[in-house]
Image (spheres, grey):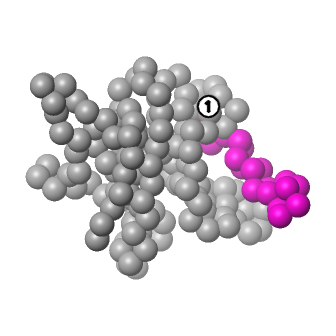
Amino acid sequence: DGKIFNLKPTLDEARCTLNPPLFHGSSLVRDVFWISTFEYVAVYESNDEIKVVHVQNQKDRKIATKFTDFGDIFYSEPGRAIAVQFAQILPWSTLVLGCSRGIELGVIGTVPDKQGQFLFNLDEGSRAEMPFKDGEPTYPVGMCVDY
């Protein structure tokens, strides 16, 4: 139902983040990459649609959770199983994401002197894309970043 739980070491619930108000109806959490205790990137699926969402909880629970919707950054094809790969590049404050349903990799990161996470729109010749084989797209089954 799109909820994400933070658990204590005793496996008791510490916090519950509800389904973001980005979908009409319920969604499933397909993968989560934790950046810090209160910040993470989650991949949601609803009605065969994928959305990558940056979630920023606040220590003070009275302050609302902030959701940044990046949409389908993979240009995914419906009907395929979902497996998401994350690669964090700490010196550059970026996160590279790949999906078994998409031919492109997405890059999310921070920008100096600005708050929040941003989706980097790379130039056509600079994008990380999966190659075509015999005129058909190929899809990633894993990912490794060497920098």
Q: Looking at the picture, tell me which residue is in the foreground, 113 or 100.
A: 100
Q: Is residue 41 visible?
A: yes
In what quadrant of the picture does the C terminus appear?
Answer: bottom left
Q: Position of residue 91 (x, y in %)?
A: 38, 78
Q: Position of residue 77 (x, y in %)?
A: 35, 26
Measured along the vertical axis of the image, is residue 45 above or below residue 122? above
In the figure, is residue 102 to the left or right of 79?
left
In what quadrant of the picture does the N terminus appear?
Answer: top right
In the rendered structure, does residue 104 fall within the stretch colored magenta? no
Q: Looking at the picture, tell me which residue is in the foreground, 80 or 51.
A: 80
Label 1: few (<14), some or many (≥20) within 10 Å?
many
**Count of numbered labels shown in the rendering:** 1
Q: Position of residue 13 (x, y in %)?
A: 85, 54
In the figure, is residue 60 to the left or right of 27?
right
For badge 1, the amino acid type reads Ser
Asked which secondary structure carries label 1, the reply is loop
Q: Looking at the picture, tell me which residue is in the foreground, 65 or 98.
A: 98
Q: Which residue is rendered at x = 12% and y = 25% of the image?
A: 134
In the figure, is residue 1 to the left or right of 69?
right
Q: Which residue is rendered at x = 39% and y = 69% of the image?
A: 89
Q: Which residue is rendered at x = 16% and y = 56% of the image?
A: 126
Q: Position of residue 4 (x, y in %)?
A: 70, 47
Q: Which residue is rendered at x = 79% and y = 57% of the image?
A: 7
In the rendered structure, does residue 7 fall within the stretch colored magenta? yes
Q: Is residue 21 visible?
A: no
**Which residue was labeled with disc 1?**
27
Measured along the vertical axis of the image, is residue 132 above or below residue 108? above
State the extent of the magenta-drawn residues as a range.
3-22
